[in-house]
Image (cartoon, rainbow, N blue to C red):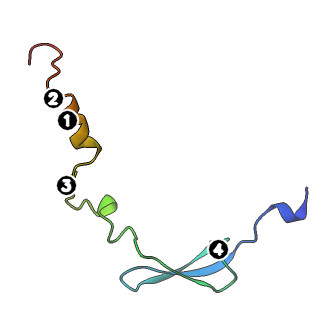
Amino acid sequence: MKEATHPHYHMIKVVMTDGSEFMTRSTLGAEGDTLNLDIDPKTHPAWTGGSQQLMDRGGRLSRFNSRFAGISFGKK
């Protein structure tokens, strides 16, 4: 097996948005580098279950609804 085919794993520090830190192994950067997260599981609505509403401002959903508003596929 070739030696240069696998990435070098080393320890880096990850800093969450609330300031908490932890160490993990990664191929990012060099030994001892710091990764500052902008979005993490503690704050992102996808993980926290935050209430997000579908906001369509004249995009695809609005165009679809206006284009096919008169089509009916049977009784409702």
Query: CB atoms at circles 3 and 2 under 8 Å apart?
Result: no
Above or below — where is 14 with respect to 74?
below
**For mark 3, does the 10 Å Cα neighbourhood hold few (<14), some (14 to 19), or many (20 or more) residues?**
few
Identified by mark 1, the residue type is: Asn
Residue of label 4: 28
Instruction: Say whether disc 3 or disc 2 marks the residue closer to the N-terminus.
Output: 3
Above or below — where is 76 with respect to 36?
above
Secondary structure beneath dot 4 equals loop
Instruction: Say whether disc 4 or disc 3 marks the residue closer to the N-terminus.
Output: 4
Mark drawn on residue 29: none
**For mark 2, does the 10 Å Cα neighbourhood hold few (<14), some (14 to 19), or many (20 or more) residues?**
few
Distance from Cα at disc 4 to Cα at disc 3: 35 Å
Residue of label 1: 65
Mark drawn on residue 53: 3
The quarter of the image holding the N terminus is bottom right
Mark drawn on residue 69: 2
Query: CB atoms at circles 4 and 1 under 8 Å apart?
Result: no
Distance from Cα at disc 3 to Cα at disc 1: 18 Å
